[in-house]
Image: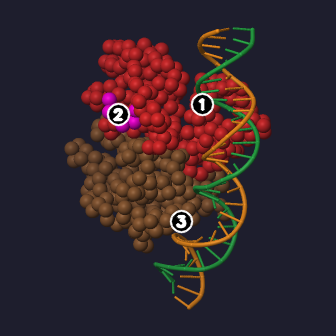
Chain colours: A red, B brown, C orange, D green
DNA sequence: CGACGGTTTGAGTCCGGTCAATTGTCGTGG
DNA sequence: CCACGACAATTGACCGGACTCAAACCGTCG
């Protein structure tokens, strides 16, 4: 059984908790799109959506399925990926709290999504959004902002995949992770590598073996400290030099 | 002098033709965003913008410059690219009539743009759009639609760059070109390869030599016919099989 | 015609992939 | 508590596809 078939066969199960007016999940963690929803909801009337907690390794949506809902993350890590017919996989992105996924102008999802860790999601009906768009002027702007940022990140990734060496890719990846996860203060600390080597490899266009080897080299040269599933950038300057890029990567 | 420095040094020159009410350029070629602008303009009041004709090989905008305007293409081909500090280049996309570029939620452009052929552009002041967004409810939706499509294309490209072989990349590229350019009817005809081998290589994450070699092989096996700067897909089925991908590539 | 830039073709090299074996980690059950 | 199994991660040996370097070819334009 191919990887593609195996993944496609996995069922999608949502333990849905309905919230008619507002959403405890959003309320507890006002980030990104959810924050916008909350602000808009308070000002006018609430955008009905549901909250759900899902364990790790679950399929959240499948490429090609009807794009009926879109999601925001309030807790945990999600990976987006696409498959080739022979099972080769490309992870197009790792998403964290505040990020949005499943939004599509087409009628089908253009990628699959799976939880990397246990996650908390908010689930919005797409059709409803279409209908009440006029009443929520801030929401579409917010979505546009998030999608634009996603596009900028995708373009950075295209540079990485098209022109960077294995070492540069791994260095870029770790720096991006640090920048993404150390927003709430503790800069320079340990960051959680919640995804497997295979996920990282599929994200960087490499193999698990190469990722592992590069980690070993970076560890040996003192650039990073690696313990279990945690990493710390020891020599930020060296890593940034390695990651290269005239654009500075911080969009 | 590095490639990066050379490109950065090239001046940006715009022969601007002002249109206070409406734009002949848009009016003549109602596609994509320009069409939306026109529709909105007729219904309410006109979105002031300027039209410009630019010869090929000109820098349209530079990564890092203040994102004061965004553009739509009414005629010709534009390439977007990013540079690494040592001059390595990644072309993130080729754009055609109806496409939008230079739109950014950040205050700086995240990529550079250059005309591949002589082009006709419409130039919109970003600040003005911010101000009158409420009066043009359809415009932001239109931009969101275009940006979303761009994102989907970028994700396809990430699969290509991360997981496809040189042959698969070239086949995918040619098929995408055909699908993009043969919209106005003449399917299966000749398509213009307006960009150089170097541009294609930078787009596909390969070298010019490899692109050339693959072209030769595809020509030899009867999959394509190559004459000067024109190509024709002779064996669509074989090419689609080569291009691979469970997603079918048509988003 | 000759100069120039882009393209094609060839020969050799190397980075990262492939295949395979080993080690490490964690959860389970005896 | 430890033995065991399953799976992830690491390490090693080898290979090959794409890159590099180099030369020849070609179309365009002065």
- Indicate the quadrant containing the C terminus of chain B: top left, top right, bottom left or bottom right: top left
**Can residue A156 be seen in the rendering of this structure?**
no
The image quadrant of residue A239 is top right
Q: In the figure, A6 relative to D27: above or below?
A: above
Q: Nearer the viewer, residue B51 or B218?
A: B218
Please state the chain letter of the residue tagged with numbered disc 1 in the rendered image.
A
User: In the picture provided, is C19 more to the left or to the right than B60?
Assistant: right
**Extreme residue in the right direction:** A221
* Helix, strand or loop status at disc 2: loop
> Which mark sits nearer the N-terminus, 1 or 2?
2
Q: Chain of mark 3?
A: B
Give the magenta range: A62-68
| Residue position for label 3 | B213
Q: Are marks 1 and 3 on the same chain?
A: no
Q: Residue A65: which disc? A: 2
Determine if residue A87 is in view: yes
Q: Position of residue A99 (x, y in %)?
A: 48, 29
Q: Position of residue B31 (x, y in %)?
A: 29, 53
Magenta segment's dominant SS is: loop
Which residue lies at the image location 58% right of the left edge and 46% below the top edge? A160
Q: Residues within 10 Å of mark 2 (few under 14, many from 20)?
A: few
How far, Cα to Cα, is label 1 from label 3?
36 Å
Residue at x-position 54% and y-position 23%: A117
Image location (x, y in percent) of residue B129: 37, 42
Circle 1 residue: A196
Q: Residue at x 60, y 30 (%)?
A: A196
Magenta region includes residue A66 = yes
Which sits in the foreground, B206 or B238?
B238
Circle 1 SS class: loop
Residue B213 in magenta stretch: no
């Amino acid at each position: 059984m191919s990887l593609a078939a195996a993944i496609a066969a996995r069922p999608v199960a949502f333990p849905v908790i309905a919230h008619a007016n507002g959403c405890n999940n959003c309320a507890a963690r006002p980030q990104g799109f959810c924050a916008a929803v909350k602000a808009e909801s308070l000002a006018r009337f609430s955008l009905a959506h549901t909250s759900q907690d899902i364990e790790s390794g679950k399929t959240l949506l499948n490429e090609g399925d009807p794009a009926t809902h879109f999601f925001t993350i309030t807790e945990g890590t999600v990976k987006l990926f696409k498959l080739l017919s022979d099972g080769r996989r490309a992870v197009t992105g790792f998403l964290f709290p505040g990020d949005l996924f499943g939004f599509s102008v087409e009628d089908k999802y253009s990628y699959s999504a799976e939880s990397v860790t246990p996650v908390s999601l908010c689930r919005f009906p797409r059709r409803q959004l279409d209908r009440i768009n006029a009443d929520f002027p801030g929401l579409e702007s917010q979505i546009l902002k998030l999608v634009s940022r996603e596009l900028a990140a995708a373009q950075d990734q295209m540079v990485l995949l098209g022109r960077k060496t294995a070492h540069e890719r791994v260095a870029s990846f770790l720096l991006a992770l640090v920048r993404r996860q150390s927003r709430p203060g503790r800069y320079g600390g340990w960051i959680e590598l919640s995804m497997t080597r295979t996920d990282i490899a599929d994200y960087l266009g490499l193999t698990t073996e190469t990722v592992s080897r590069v980690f070993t080299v970076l560890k040996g040269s003192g650039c990073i400290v690696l313990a279990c599933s945690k990493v710390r950038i020891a020599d930020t300057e060296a890593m940034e030099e390695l990651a290269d890029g005239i654009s500075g990567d911080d969009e």
